[in-house]
Amino acid sequence: MVKEINEKEFNELKGTYLVDFNATWCGPCKMLAPVLNKLSDEIKDVPFYGLDVDDAEEACIKNNVTNIPCVILFKDGVEVARKVGFGPEAMYRDFINNNK
């Protein structure tokens, strides 16, 4: 399951993790949510987090998030890979497995 976090929690994350920058009003974000929830159950070695862009302005600016949904894989706070927009489950599975 994707864990919803706030900006303070985001700033404290360590290790390898995936963050879905999203918004409650974003249609493609709503479509992506069940895909990421399913993958989070499959891919156990990478924690999945959701961050609402409306409540995390500084994190969005710092990470140059200008379009959503924006899924970023981080290692110790450094961006490793990014996918913007909605896509099929297989694309996200490969994106995560190829970059973790």
Image: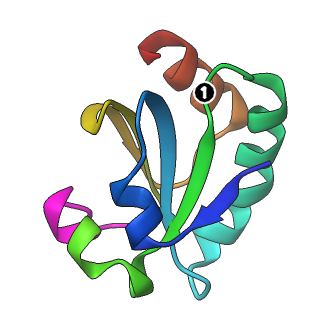
Q: Which residues are magenta?
A: 60-68
| Element type where label 1 sits in the image | loop
**Lateral position of residue 61 relative to residue 27, left or right:** left
Residue for badge 1: 46
* Residue at point 50%, 24% (across, down): 95
Task: Residue 62 in the image: state x and y as whole percent.
Answer: 15, 61
Residue 56 visible at all: yes
Please state which of residues 19 and 76 is positioned toward the viewer in this rendering. 76
**Lateral position of residue 34 relative to residue 13, left or right:** right
Q: Is residue 11 above or below residue 1?
A: below
Which of the 4 image quadrants contains residue 76? top left
In magenta stretch: residue 93:
no
Task: Residue 59 in the image: state x and y as whole percent.
Answer: 27, 66
Q: Residues within 10 Å of mark 1 (few under 14, many from 20)?
A: some
Majority secondary structure of the magenta segment? Answer: loop
In magenta stretch: residue 63:
yes
Please state which of residues 19 and 77 is positioned toward the viewer in this rendering. 77
* Residue at point 61%, 84% (across, down): 24
Task: Residue 26 in the image: state x and y as whole percent.
Answer: 56, 80
